[in-house]
Image (cartoon, helix red, strand yellow):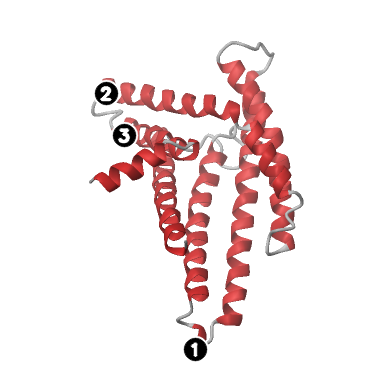
Amino acid sequence: MSKALNEVCDMLDTYTGRDKIVRTLCYTTKLASGMYANKDPDFAKKLAIFSSKMSQTRATLRLFDDLPMLSYSLSYGMGSKEPDRIMGLIGFITNLIDHVYYPVDKICWMIEYKLLNVENPTKWDTVNSIFWVASIYLNLMKTIRSYTVMEQHKAHINKPENESSQAVKMLLIKQRMELISIVRLTLDLVHAGSTLPKGMLWGGKFESWHVGLIGTISSFIGLYQYFAKKRIISKSS
C-alpha cells in the first residue's frame, strides 16, 4: 500500500505525471457525463462542469511549456541522435510545429478568458486544432518509423545464440512500448481530428461521450506507460 502511495505521490510531484492525472480525470468525467445525460441530467451537468474545469487546468498549465520546449528543441537539433534520418527529420519538423502551436494556444486561452478581443475567435480555435492534429500525426509517423527500425534491427540480431541476451530482451520491451504508443497516438489523432470544424476530416461528427471514451482509453494507456517506463528504468539501472 505504501509503495503504491509513494509511486502516486512521485507522479504528482512531476508536471508530466500531474498532467496525466488531470487528463484522466477530464476524460473519465466527460465519458460519465455522456452516459448519464439521459438518466440523470443534473448529475451529468456536474460531471461536464468538472471535466471542463480539468481541461481548463491543462490549458493554463500549458502556458509555461514554451521554455521547456525550447530547451528540448535546442538539444534535439536536427535529430542527429536519432537512429534513423527519417525519424530525425520528422522530429525536427514536429518541434517547429509545436513552437508555432504554443503561441496560438496562448491566444486561444486569452480569447476564452476575455483577455483578448478578436473578430473571429472560431478561426483561432481551428488553427489551433490544425497544429494539434499535425503534431500528433507526425509523432505517430515517427513512432511507426521507430517500430520499423527496431524490427529491422531485431531481424539482424534475432539468432538462437542471442535469444537470451539482455540486449535482445530490452529491444523487445522497447518495441512493445512503441507499439502501445502507436495505439495511444492513433486514439489521440482521432480525438484531435474531431475538434476540427465540420467538413475537415471527421470534425464535429463525434458526440461528447465518444470523445470521453477515446480520451479515457488513451489516458489509461498513458498511465500504464508512465509506470511501465519507471519499472524498465529501475530494472536496467
Question: Measuring 40% from the left and 57% from the top, which residue is drawn there?
Answer: 231
> Along the line of sight, which residue is nearer the eye, 231 or 143?
231
Marked residue nearer the N-terminal end (2 or 3): 3
Q: How many marks?
A: 3
Is 32 or 145 nearer to us in this picture?
145
Distance from Cα at disc 1 to Cα at disc 2: 59 Å
Above or below residue 168? Residue 130 is: above
Residue designated by label 2: 43
| Disc 2 secondary structure class | helix
In percent of the image, x 66 and y 25: which residue is there?
Answer: 124
State which mark lies toward you, 1 or 2. Answer: 1
As drawn, is 147 to the left or to the right of 173? right
Q: Amino acid at mark 1?
A: Pro
Q: Which residue is mark 3?
A: 32
Q: Residues within 10 Å of mark 3 (few under 14, many from 20)?
A: some
Asked where in the image residue 131 lies, by quadrant, the reply is: top right
Q: Position of residue 208 (x, y in %)?
A: 42, 33
Q: How far separated are the C-alphas under marks 2 and 3?
A: 9 Å
> Would you name the residue on which mark 1 appears?
160
Q: Position of residue 55 (x, y in %)?
A: 46, 28
Furthest residue to the right? Answer: 78
